[in-house]
Amino acid sequence: MQLIYVVATWLAFLLLWPFLLVHKKTRQGQLRRLGFYPPGWPAPGGRPRIWMHGSSAGDLLALKPMVAEMKKRFPGCVVVMSAFTNSGWQMAKERIPEADEVTYVPWDLPGSTARALASIDPDLLVLEYTEIWPNLIHAARRRGVKVAITNGRFSPAKLESYRRFFRIAGDPLAKIDLFLMRDEDEAERALTLGAAPERVRVTGNTKFDGLVGPSGADEAKLRAALGAGPFFIAGSTHEGEEALLLPVFRKLREEFPRLRLAIAPRYVDRAAKIVSLAEGEGFSCGLRSKGAPDADVVILDTIGELSAAYRLGTLVFVGGSFTNRGGQNILEPAGQGRPVLFGPNMDNFKDSVQVLVGRGGIQVADPEQLLRVSRDLLARPEKLEELGALARSAVGAIRGASVRNVDQMARILASSTAPAAAVGT
């Protein structure tokens, strides 16, 4: 069946490549995506060599604590990180200095994946969430490379789709040595899809380990660019949500005239559109990249500053929750000691909702309730402080997945031999 998948991926690639060459998320790094690297890349180093892959900026940030733990556990090891999106690559270069190299994941074609593995020469390939690339996994196994899934998740609504895909792709789950799942439900779904029981572990989610961060130069730099607060931070907003939030902000300003709104859109290329929306509502508006110390509304059109923005906030709303997106990361602002508001649609972050509701997180049904709750909290600074401390404590209590994951990876590395030579492309 794998032959069918290989033929299908080649046909799909030939059809889609012109689009991929110009798409904002994939247009960079085309040679590396085909598995072609500069001579001598990556720099030689010790063992083990670990290749860790996450698709986007947020996925790679969830891997960051595990990179640090790897470096602590295996002094002299080499960690190569790969991203699918251009923003993920940029963020990893800027925000994960512990990684020895950052590159792009190869297209899931036999030649591209084999060349990438030959260049990186890993002992262990770590794939995050559902980043299951069958040709990459198959090529890794042919070289004797161990394969692990971390922060594993399988959507319950897509189980039948996964089954069909895995049958066509030659059962890639059978070639994965270790499934490190986020929770018991995810582990059950992995078993249902055919993962071997002795390879499945529940270790938690490494994204929790990087949530509690101290203030630093990044915060001071952002504070200088944005000017004085208090700030209502709207993080990771999606199309349509700003139009709901701006009237809420207008009504809050009637009672709290010094309040300012900072919007961090999930996709920064929407910044200009949001500026037009805010100005259309009569607000002065500016971009963080140009400095906006006096604007009523500031748009964060930069990457990697969201945690610092949350620390500057008095109150936080996390987007993706008033749309059908299924939510965004509500634990990040909680880890910065801020109370967190979010809407009703949190299907992709149910575990986070369970952690935070009643512990510094407040779910609201609609913008009207958001207004009522925000108005009440802004009028009670002591309640804001209490909820923020509670949120930070809740996040601190669920940390530790990175250590548990590295423990499990050390076990399979100890049982492996050095990767064999490539047997073809």
Image (tube, rainbow, N blue to C red):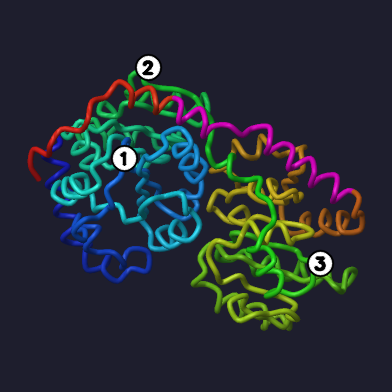
Residue 278 locus on image (x, y percent): 67, 78
* Residue 287 - label: none
Q: Quadrant of residue 84?
A: bottom left
Q: Please name which of the two marks, 2 or 1, marks the residue nearer to the observer.
A: 1
Question: Which part of the image, by quadrant, shows the C terminus?
Answer: top left
Does label 2 or label 3 sit earlier along the sequence?
A: 2
Q: Which of 279 and 180 is in front in this view?
A: 180
* Residue 197 - label: 2
Write the residue at 75% across / 60% down: 313
Q: How many marks?
A: 3
Residues packed near mark 1 inside 10 Å, few (<14), some (14 to 19) or many (20 plus): few
Cα separation between marks 2 and 1: 32 Å
Residue 409 locus on image (x, y percent): 39, 28
Q: Does the segment drawn in magenta span residue 294?
A: no
Write the residue at 80% across / 69% down: 229
Write the residue at 69% across / 56% down: 215
Instruction: Check disc 1 and report the residue beneath it.
Output: 46
Instruction: Check disc 3 and report the residue beneath it.
Output: 230
Circle 2/circle 1 CB separation < 8 Å: no
Q: Can residue 153 be seen in this view?
A: no
Magenta region: 383-407
Residue type at mark 3 is Pro
Write the residue at 62% across / 39% down: 352
Q: Main secondary structure of the magenta part?
A: helix
User: Left or right: where does residue 345 sit relative to residue 409?
Assistant: right
Residue type at mark 2 is Pro
